[in-house]
Image (cartoon, grey):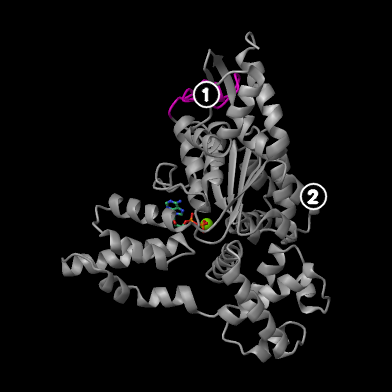
Amino acid sequence: MNNISAQELWTRAVDAIRGEIGEEQSELWLRPVEALKLDEQILLVRVPNKYFADGIKKNFQKRLSLILKDITSREIGLDYEISRDLKDVLPANDPISDPSPQSDFPLSELNPRYTFGSFVLGDSNRFAAATAEAVSKSPGTQYNPYFIYGGVGLGKTHLMHAIGNEMRRLRPRARVLYTTSERFVNEYITCIQHNRPDDFRSKFRNLDCLLIDDIQFLIGKDRSEQEFFHTFNDLFAAKKQVVMSSDRSPKEMSPSEQRLISRFEWGVVADIKPPDLETRIAILRKKADTEGFYVPDDVILFVASNVKTNIRALEGALIRLKAFASMTGSALTVDDAKDILKDALTSESSSPVRMETIQRIVAFKYSVEVRDLKGHQRTAAIAMPRQVAMYLACVMTDLSLKEIGRSFGGKDHTTVLHAREKIRKLVDADPFFLPLINKLEADIRAVENQ
Ligand code: ADP
Ligand code: MG
């Protein structure tokens, strides 16, 4: 097949890989890619930003190369061109692409330090960050609405500000508003009290991009939720970007307006997980470097190994170390760090957590109901999560076996003991089980640390 065009080849390759990676992955990663040029050995494609290039290389390149070879009967490499030119990503008649410098819209405060450049990437957040950057380049398109969820202190607010900052940099006239859902509710209430609902509406419904943080506080508050629903629908219908963050996934929320949830899922939903060790090290390094603060490698490793679930806590640790170092003027050692961070470390690793959090997180993970965990059904689909929750209750709370049994619908302490031993053995024997348990622990801690 020698005379196939670049576009045709790319379309066929994407069609072929879609069957393997699924519609969703292919839409997210491959649809924004445009084939530019094909020569003997190279297919040149344009991607929205470098995260896309990295993500595609990492996740799909091997398979794509085989498919390209299948179609053309020759070895074809992929080459990436990063789209830098705004006109490539903006619709031709985009009303806000005019880069004249002032905006007549009252600017909402965006933290200038929260940018894509200062956001450290790792497997735990790469997709959320790549999508955020794509949103900022082409708002109101296929990533609309964009819903980010994840535990506390993992970078949701940072990414939302980064979207706002980047949009403003690219299009100074864009009407971008960042707000928290609490502020949204308060403003709504104030306008209603002063009998000025139209002020509220005209403010929110004339935006190019609404960034609304911690939406879990709004969901379930009847009238504010209704108002948000209308705002959302108006913006969406006008192809304006809506970005939301939450500490839980759309599926975990129970809005009074059920239609909201399906709306959230029309665009892209991305989660941010707790960072792995490597990412935690990179974040500490970057923050220390930015502040011109020298921290020896072994101290960085010590902190990164011990502060696991929350990036805000990592930053807090660094600030304390810095205060100490500037006081003593000598180089930090691991022993200093142990001493300085003693309180922070014990609260991270051993403070007891609430049973209801354990049960809620485990039930969600296994797609069962909390009442199933407390019930008596013994099918594997329920017995397993029940035992996992009991095990976690043993390691994460101060409760006795008897008390734990009682919290699971009045079970005997021997049942709890049995669960604990069974799961402990599984953790030892099955290499896939440990990460699962670690993740559950991290999610539970994240909720508890809020
Ligand atoms: P969330 O909104 O999810 O609770 P934040 O966005 O407020 O979390 O993040 C907490 C702190 O951690 C912020 O200071 C933020 O800059 C920092 N942070 C989070 N993720 C990253 C990251 N990947 N790289 C650098 N800093 C990060
Ligand atoms: Mg936040």
Q: Can residue 355 be seen from the camera position used here?
A: no
Choose top left, top right, bottom left or bottom right for residue 24: top right
**Which amino acid type corresponds to the residue marked 1 in the rendered image?**
Gly
> Nearer the N terminus, badge 1 or badge 2?
1
Residue drawn at the location 49% of the way across and 64% of the way down: 309
- The span picked out in magenta is 77-101
Q: Nearer the viewer, mark 1 or mark 2?
A: 1
Q: Specify whether 95 is left or right of 275.
A: right
Quadrant for the N terminus, please. top right
Q: Nearer the viewer, residue 307 or 212?
A: 307
What is the CA distance from the residue labelled 1 to the residue labelled 2?
A: 45 Å
Numbered badge on residue 165: none
Quadrant for the C terminus, please. bottom right
| Residue 59 x %, y % | 57, 39
**Which element carries disc 1, helix, strand or loop?**
strand
Choose top left, top right, bottom left or bottom right for residue 192: bottom right
Membership of 124 in magenta stretch: no
Indicate yes or no: mark 1 CB to ligand 1 under 8 Å.
no
Q: Specify whether 189 is left or right of 50.
A: right
**Which amino acid type corresponds to the residue marked 2 in the rendered image?**
Arg
Q: Nearer the viewer, residue 7 or 19?
A: 19
Q: Which residue is under mark 1? A: 77
Q: Which residue is under mark 2? A: 259
Quick one: label 1, few (<14), some, or many (20+) residues within 10 Å? some
Residue drawn at the location 51% of the way across and 41% of the way down: 163
Q: Which residue reaches farthest top?
A: 3
In the depicted structure, whether residue 412 falls above or below residue 361: below
